[in-house]
Amino acid sequence: EPEVTQTPSHQVTQMGQEVILRCVPISNHLYFYWYRQILGQKVEFLVSFYNNEISEKSEIFDDQFSVERPDGSNFTLKIRSTKLEDSAMYFCASSQGGIIPGELFFGEGSRLTVL
Amino acid sequence: SQQGEEDPQALSIQEGENATMNCSYKTSINNLQWYRQNSGRGLVHLILIRSNEREKHSGRLRVTLDTSKKSSSLLITASRAADTASYFCATDAWRNQFYFGTGTSLTVIP
């Protein structure tokens, strides 16, 4: 069964460092998403990506964040200068999209710890 | 905000009992979905109900949708210990954007 894969599963970084989280969405999906979940809390929308551009982003997704689909398979989230409050689980998701969107398929997440 | 809110925040029941979780949302929607998350794992899709549907079943799951009240409920019948997880509703209003609620943490006691 196709699945969304994310790497790394866990990354520890120092405050101020750049972090890149990687995702391989399901191959025939058209919409890609990043969500964030601070431990035990709600799942927060960060950004959606379609047709090689951001289609929507939340207030959380400020200038420190960027996304890229560099090679047609990977979908990356970059945090330019990490802060303590960026510590969270980051989930990538993809969907087929369309007029009637279907389900989101999630990866297992990348846990980011900022020290 | 389009984000939904589930209640209760936490629910603890005995195995074999039914579990009911509710979701309220604020804006008009195209679809509402329910997801499950085991501790520390990704979210897994359970069921989707369209805005023109009122009820949907899938195995031991029953979902209702009341668009006039902007609310949905998820019923898990004959619960099992393996149903222990967090359950989230997600709404999409336009452009394939999905917004999640705060989640209900369900504990099923064997």
Image: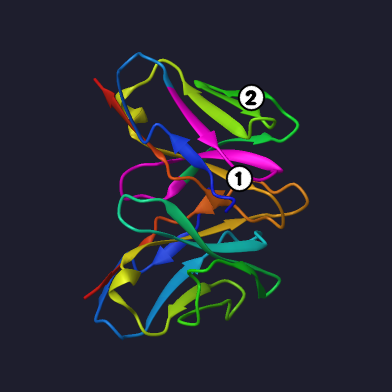
- The disc, 2 or 1, on the residue closer to the chain's N-terminal end is 2
The magenta stretch spans residue A103: no
Category of crowding for the residue at label 2, using alpha-carbon neighbours closer than 10 angstroms: few (below 14), some (14–19), many (at least 20): some
Which numbered circle lies on residue B13? none
Query: Which color mode does the image show?
Result: rainbow
- Residue A38, placed above or below residue A78: above
**Distance between the alpha carbons at the discs numbered 2 and 1:** 16 Å
Read off the residue under disc 2: B56
Image-based side of A77 in relation to A114, left or right: right
Look at the image and give the residue range highlighted in magenta: B20-43
| Residue A111 image-quadrant placement | bottom left
Q: Which residue lies furthest to the left in this view?
A: A115
| Residue B102 image-quadrant placement | top left
Q: Which chain carries label 1?
A: B
Q: Residue furthest right?
A: A99
Read off the residue under disc 1: B91
What's under tag 1, amino acid-wise? Thr
